[in-house]
Amino acid sequence: MGQLLSFVAVPRAWIFMVLALVAIQRIAELFISRRHERALRARGAVEHGAAHYPFIVAVHAGWLMALALWAAFRSPVMNPAGIALYLALQPVRAWVIASLGRYWTTRIISLPDAPLVRGGPYRFLKHPNYAVVVLEIALLPLALGAWPIAAVFSVLNALVLWVRISAENRALAARG
């Protein structure tokens, strides 16, 4: 148990490398999302809950910026077990995206005649992507010794997800 909670000093560059990889992953996902959005809109899909989307972007961007600032002004430490858990979430994230396929976007884009996805992680959870995000928002800061960032951004994320999931559930209910 002690090793799960232990931190090791690491070069600051390692922390920034981890954060850069997370940022690159998120930017790549935005490109995939945009491509899917354009294709879905061309087929008649509509967006739901667009007003809250900038807040989601702000929470995610703020989270990464807060972590970068933390790393810049604190002694760089890392919990290897926490980083391993964070990395273990990434195949689940990929599974969610793959399960939704061409319907996956970072926005709520609904194509009225498209079937609801019920396979992959959606067999187990209604919103598996949000479960992954909740864990990521808390876990990465905790793995870097930044518990205040984990606390603040977990609360902010919970607030935007409350709005987001409500909007998404309404959009899905309209499709039957």
Image (cartoon, rainbow, N blue to C red):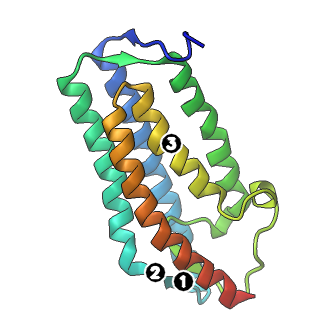
Q: Residue at x 52, y 25 (%)?
A: 82
Q: Earlier in the sequence, mark 1 or mark 2?
A: 1
Q: Nearer the viewer, residue 44 or 13?
A: 13
- Could you give the CA–CA distance between mark 1 and mark 3, rounded to whole angstroms? 30 Å
Q: Quarter of the image containing the N terminus?
A: top right
- Could you give the CA–CA distance between mark 1 and mark 2, rounded to whole angstroms? 15 Å
Depicted 80 relative to depicted 33: above or below? above
- Displayed quadrant of residue 90: top right
Identify residue for label 3: 136
Q: Amino acid at mark 3?
A: Glu
Depicted 5 relative to depicted 48: above or below? above
- Displayed quadrant of residue 149: top left
Identify residue for label 2: 49
Circles 1, 3 touching at the beta carbon (< 8 Å): no
Residue 130: give x, y in percent of width and height.
57, 57
Label 3 crowding class (10 Å Cα cut-off): few <14, some 14-19, many 20+?
A: some
Q: Amino acid at mark 1?
A: Arg
Q: Is residue 104 left or right of residue 155?
A: right
Q: Nearer the viewer, residue 149 or 101?
A: 149
Label 1 crowding class (10 Å Cα cut-off): few <14, some 14-19, many 20+?
A: some
Q: Amino acid at mark 2?
A: Gly
For mark 3, give the secondary structure.
Answer: helix
Circles 2, 3 touching at the beta carbon (< 8 Å): no
Q: Is residue 126 left or right of residue 86?
A: right
Residue situated furthest left in the rendering: 73
For mark 1, give the secondary structure.
Answer: helix
Q: Nearer the viewer, mark 1 or mark 3?
A: 3
Identify residue for label 1: 41
